[in-house]
Image (cartoon, helix red, strand yellow):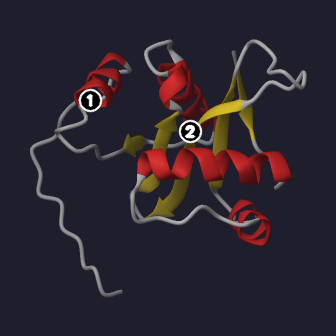
Amino acid sequence: MAIELVQEASAELEQAFVTLIPQLSSSAQPFKLEELEEFLSQDNIYLLVYRADTPDANGNYPILGMLTLVTFQIPTGWRAWIEDVVVDSQARGQGAGQQLVEAALDLAKHKGVKSIDLTSRPSRAAANRLYQRCGFQLRETNVYRFQDA
């Protein structure tokens, strides 16, 4: 099992998005190769992927999970959000999510981030337990969204 920081788009990454994004969201469309290139070219956005530890039939180590770390500077310091955490259904419960989150925490610390936030629906019980195991604490807050932006 390996965590990688993705540096460039590839057909393999495009296929991983086709597999993983529908497991994350029923309304989001997976990026095409050109969209992946644009996404990865953004400053302070980091895509981490989790690869299987055993090769598939073609000898490749498939991408079975991913996480996006977004870092930004505001007047009170560098902050971060973890977004779009997803692990393929065949790899869940094997530590992939925890490895992705821990790698994101290490990367954020290296970047000088003061705090990292994330959100997770209450119905995602396993994910919420994972985040708590990784040291995240539930905050008493209101989250607002303006949809038509």
Say if residue 68 shows up in the picture. no
Most distant residue in the right direction: 59
Q: Quick check: 65 left or right of 42?
A: left
Most distant residue in the bottom direction: 148
Residue 61 % position (x, y): 80, 24
Residue 77 % position (x, y): 45, 54
- For label 2, the crowd category at 10 Å Cα-Cα, with few meaning under 14, some 14 to 19 and many 20 or more, is many
The quarter of the displayed image where residue 14 is located: bottom right
Name the one closer to the observer, 129 or 42. 129
Foreground disc of the pair 2, 1: 1
Q: Quick check: 138 left or right of 12?
A: left
Give the position of the C terminus as an image quadrant. bottom left
Q: Quick check: 85 left or right of 125?
A: right
Say if residue 47 shows up in the picture. yes
- For label 1, the crowd category at 10 Å Cα-Cα, with few meaning under 14, some 14 to 19 and many 20 or more, is some
Q: CA distance from mark 2 to mark 1?
A: 20 Å
Give the position of the N terminus as an image quadrant. top right
Residue 49 % position (x, y): 66, 36
Indicate the amino acid at tag 2: Ala
Mark 2 and mark 1 in contact? Answer it, CB < 8 Å: no
Q: Residue at x 35, y 45 (%)?
A: 117
Q: Residue at x 16, y 40 (%)?
A: 139
Q: Quick check: 55 left or right of 64?
A: right
Tell me the element at label 2: helix
Indicate the amino acid at tag 1: Asn
Q: Is residue 94 above or below residue 69?
A: above
Q: Is residue 88 above or below residue 47?
A: above
Q: Which residue is mark 1?
A: 128
Name the one closer to the observer, 98 or 25. 25
Name the one closer to the observer, 57 or 4. 57
Q: Which residue is mark 2?
A: 108
